[in-house]
Image (cartoon, helix red, strand yellow):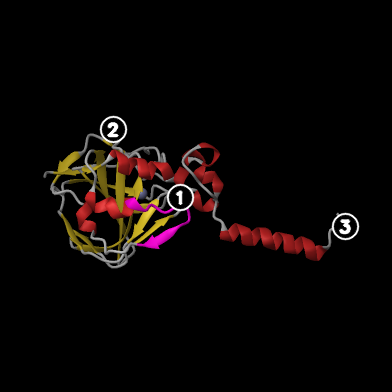
Amino acid sequence: MRTILPGAFAALLLSVAVAGEQQPPHWSYRGEHGPTHWAQMDPGFSTCALGRVQSPIDIRNALKADLPEIDFAYSAGPAEVLNNGHTVQVNLPASGGIAIAGVNYALLQFHFHTPSEERIAGMAMPMVAHLVHKSAAGQLAVVAVLFKQGRENPALANVFATLPAEGGKYRLADSFDPSRILPVKRGYYAFEGSLTTPPCSENVRWQVLKEPLEVSGEQLAAFRALYPMNARPTQPLNGREVLESRN
Ligand SMILES: [Zn+2]
């Protein structure tokens, strides 16, 4: 121990601390850094294990209810496509938002999971897009759009044509209109939940649209070449009510 200079030892500790700050724990979807270990990887991730209102869920026995319509007010705007090491995300800083029961939520970004994280009566779809919104008060609201395999999705063609490698990002040459990745019918399931990725923060309002869109096998394969599986397992309901719109 005497051979280690105090100054050098302090510098070593500092470099470890700085490295720790720059690199958050690399959680993943499988193995030792998979979902059942997220809470142990960082004190800030404890809600992933201790939370009682976690997402995703298996949607079953939903109660039909007079849910308010989701008022979509999306518009075309600039889009940045990035690969954050967990998914491909499209940031939309100026593409409008939604209103639910008189509360406005600005659209921030959407991203993909394969298979869909949410299940309906136990069944997952090949892919889901999560459109993430935030109110002025800081409340998060996610709209989930499910995708089944079928024809090529033209709205996603330019994004899927150039999926960035991990850590990469670029700005789409054309503007992107998120209303093009909404189904015609806007009926939905509603429930309280959380982020489905660390830190698994709760108080997230979930709306899962019932009508799926289509995506081609080639488009799915392009995404799965980067992320073969990036879905958190379903979480216990713990007494939560799942509501279903009548339309
Ligand atoms: Zn998501």
Relative depth, front residue between 161 and 9: 161
Secondary element under disc 2, as helix, strand or loop, is: loop
In this rendering, the answer to whether 227 lies above or below 107 is above
Question: Which comes before the other along the chain, label 2 or label 3?
Answer: 3
Question: Marks 3 and 1: CB-CB under 8 Å?
Answer: no
Tell me the chief SS of the magenta region: loop
Q: Is residue 163 magenta?
A: yes
Residue occupying the point 47% across, 51% down: 85
Residue 138 in the image: state x and y as whole percent: 34, 63
Q: Residues within 10 Å of mark 1 (few under 14, many from 20)?
A: many
Q: How far apart are marks 2 and 3 (CA)?
A: 62 Å
- Mark 3 crowdedness (10 Å alpha carbons): few <14, some 14-19, many ≥20: few
Mark 2, residue position: 123
Q: Position of residue 123 (x, y in %)?
A: 28, 32
Q: Is residue 237 above or below residue 110?
A: above
Would you say residue 202 is visible in this rendering?
A: yes
Q: Quadrant of residue 109?
A: bottom left
**Residue 112 image point, x, y percent:** 34, 48
Q: Is residue 55 visible?
A: no
Q: Say if disc 3 is inside 8 Å of ligand 1.
A: no
Label number found at residue 142: none
The residue lying furthest to the top in this view is 122
Tell me the number on the disc at residue 3: 3
Q: Tell whether 119 sits left or right of 69.
A: right
Q: What residue type is labelled 1?
A: Pro
Q: Which type of secondary structure does the marked residue at label 1 adopt? A: loop
In the image, the segment drawn in magenta is 161-171
Numbered label attached to residue 198: 1
The kind of residue on which mark 3 rests is Thr
